Image: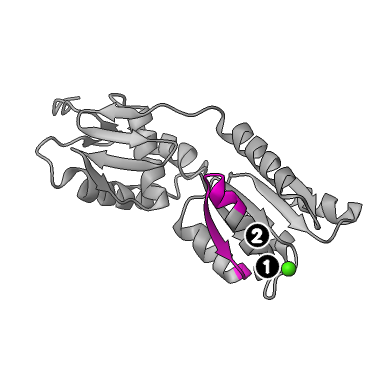
Amino acid sequence: MRVLVVEDENKISDFIKAGLTEDGFMVTVAPTGALAVSESNSHSFDAYILDLMLPDADGIELCRQFRDDGITAPILILTAKGDLADKVKGFSAGADDYLTKPFEYEELLVRLRALIRKTQGYPRSTIVIADLTIEPNAKTVHRSGTQIDLSKKEYQLLEYLARHHDRLVTREMISKGVWECDTNTYTNIIDVFINYLRKKVDAASDTKLIHTIRGKGFLLSEVAPSPKA
Ligand code: CA
């Protein structure tokens, strides 16, 4: 489980990091809003712990931005601002929980675990298609035992195709399911990402898994579709 801790007070972030690391989490600390956004763009986190008063950003705005960016992971606001008005602002910006400083580590831990459980449900099973293995919990991908490094979006697209394996996946389905967007604005981007995936997942292998169904969409399958399909 990866957690992004957005907190500018070293004492607090060190304390949270030490505790959560001991409890099996992988913790990244971002002391500014700018670093938080860049971490969030380049990695996939299972939960966010967010301070409201940051040197370069307002945590409420940051929370709203994460949601606008399509981040669905739980966000727990951890702040000294404990007024009802602040809490209401936090929740309406898309936060899932709110904890006021000073806080007990144990309470942070149980709240964090409950939030993650609520969004992720129970551990999900491994997806295996031919020699491709996807671990949805760890978000790792292997082909013939070799780990493949994917960006967040590449991973989401591959997992989506894999969950629909051996079935036609249209661009509309991908727009909705991966880009969380109802329009076809993303069609070109989808083709770009399919090409990235082909290079990373298929290029080194004799068995191609990602197939284009001309005019219809894509298919992830061990069996190549017949040209007429
Ligand atoms: Ca602060």
Q: Secondary structure at mark 1?
A: helix
Residue at the spot 31% in from the left edge and 41% down from the top edge: 141
* Amino acid under disc 2: Phe
Residue at the outermost right position = 84
Residue at the spot 66% in from the left edge and 35% down from the top edge: 114
Residue 93's disc number: none
Residue 206 percent location from the top left of the image: 9, 38
Any atom of ligand 1 within 8 Å of the CB at mark 2?
no
For residue 136, which quarter of the picture?
A: top left
The foreground one among 34 and 161 is 34
The foreground one among 47 and 105 is 105
For residue 225, which quarter of the picture?
A: top left
Region in magenta:
19-33
Vertical comparison of 86 with 46: above or below: below
- The magenta stretch spans residue 31: yes
Q: How is the image coloured?
A: one colour
**Left or right: 178, with 140 as reference point:** right
Vertical comparison of 170 with 157: above or below: above
Residue 208 percent location from the top left of the image: 16, 37
In the picture of the structure, the residue carrying the numbered disc 2 is 15
- The magenta stretch spans residue 189: no
Residue 11's disc number: 1
Residue 139 percent location from the top left of the image: 40, 42
Number of residues whose C-alpha sits closer than 10 Å to that of mark 1, classed few (under 14), some (14–19) or many (20 or more)? few
Residue at the spot 61% in from the left edge and 69% down from the top edge: 31
**Left or right: 215, with 180 as reference point:** left
C-alpha gap between disc 2 and disc 1: 6 Å
For residue 169, which quarter of the picture?
A: top left
